[in-house]
Amino acid sequence: MRANFTQLYLHYVWATWDRLPLITPDIQKLVSASIIKECEQLKCTVIAVGGIEDHVHLLTSFPPTLTISDLIKQIKGSSSHFMTHEVKPGEFFKWQGSYGAFTVSHDAIDKVANYIRNQPIHHSQKSIISTWELTPG
């Protein structure tokens, strides 16, 4: 093999500050778009992004040139800045400092992606996967 080959996938979860319902329906798509844009700049392919009013789930491919903490720091920082400076200047929007990160096998990508895309349904029907919903804090 002449070139490096990696097949790394991560599922991240993080919450709004104090789990406040800050991701309102009017900004949900903008928050997701901001997260996707930053992931692309970091050379991560977004497979799925979703969540509800107080937290976000993200599934990406993961380049070996980044650390998990640097990736999350960049995504959370850029999306928070975008929300507070461009979308809703002067309004409170902040992420919790902690996050969860889970490795995902190639065979489980579809299952995890579907779970992420259907967050509102899982939460309303109480069909959440508790280990994927854990965020310290």
Image (cartoon, rainbow, N blue to C red):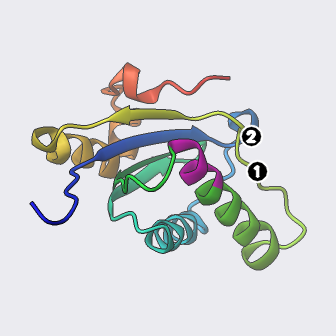
| Residue 113 spot, x, y in % from top left | 25, 49
In the displayed image of the protein, which residue is found farthest to the front? 2
- Residue at mark 1: 94
Which x, y percent locates residue 75?
Answer: 59, 58
Indicate left or right for 26 with 122 as reference: right
The answer to which quarter of the image holds residue 98 is: top right
Does residue 23 show up? no
Q: Nearer the viewer, residue 18 or 72?
A: 72
The residue under label 2 is: 17
71 is within the stretch colored magenta: yes
Q: Secondary structure at mark 2?
A: helix
The amino acid beneath tag 1 is: Lys
Nearest to N terminus: mark 2 or mark 1: 2
Residue 44 drawn at (x, y percent): 39, 63
As for residue 91 lying within the magenta part, the answer is no
Please say if 37 is above or below 15.
Answer: below
Q: Residue at x 78, y 72 (%)?
A: 88
- How packed mark 2 is, by other alpha carbons closer than 10 Å (few <14, some 14-19, many 20 or more), is some
Residue 106 lies in quadrant: top left
Q: Quick one: which residue is furthest to the bottom in this view?
A: 86
Main secondary structure along the magenta-highlighted residues: helix
Residue placed farthest to the right in the image?
90
Q: Residue at x 39, y 28 (%)?
A: 132
Query: Which stretch did the figure color magenta?
Result: 68-73
